Amino acid sequence: MPTTNTPADVQESLIEYPSDFPIKIMGVMQDAFAQTMVELVAEHDPTFHAGKMDMRPSTKGTYLALTVTVRATSREQLDNLYRALSAHPMVKVVL
């Protein structure tokens, strides 16, 4: 009997683990933002360090966009990281 992929099955198969996975984090420009995000991401990926992060200020310098590249080892790890980032008061958007 053929198996039918449910949306959850398809969604889980989009990322192969382990792999390097980029995440964009945007927040208001402030001194501690980048360092705070490094520390938060490192809690979920012990191999993460500031060298795996790119920073881009907005045109007017109001916001800072960070692209962090984490070593994704499971869907659960990524879900937990997204939840932690999204819940942080300094973060406006996580993509």
Image (cartoon, helix red, strand yellow):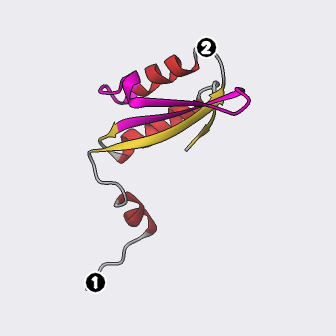
Q: Residue furthest top?
A: 31
* In this rendering, the label closer to the viewer, 2 or 1: 2
The answer to whether residue 53 is magenta is yes
Write the start and end of the magenta stretch as one range.
42-70
Judge whether residue 86 can be spotted in this image.
no
Residue for badge 2: 31
Task: Judge whether 3 appears above or below 55 on screen.
Answer: below
Q: Front-most of 89 and 35?
A: 35
Residue 42 seen in the figure: yes
Q: Is residue 94 magenta?
A: no
Label 1 element class? loop
Front one among 87 and 46? 46
Residue that mark 1 sits on: 2
Give whichever of discs 2 and 1 has the lower sequence position: 1
Q: Quadrant of the C terminus?
A: top right
- What crowding class fits label 1: few (fewer than 14 Cα within 10 Å), some (14-19), or many (20 or more)? few
Q: Position of residue 72 (x, y in %)?
A: 33, 41
Q: Amino acid at mark 1?
A: Pro
Q: Quadrant of residue 53?
A: top left
**Could you tell me which residue is drawn at 50 percent across and 24 percent down?**
37
Question: What is the distance, in whole Å, between disc 2 and disc 1 at their CAs?
Answer: 56 Å
Q: Secondary structure at mark 2?
A: loop
The spot of residue 64 in percent (x, y) is: 62, 29
Quadrant in the picture for residue 47: top left
Q: Quadrant of the N terminus?
A: bottom left
Which quarter of the picture shows residue 30?
top right
- The kind of residue tagged 2 is Asp
Residue at x 41%, y 70% (from the top left corner)? 6
Residue 33, horizontal then vertical, whole percent: 58, 20
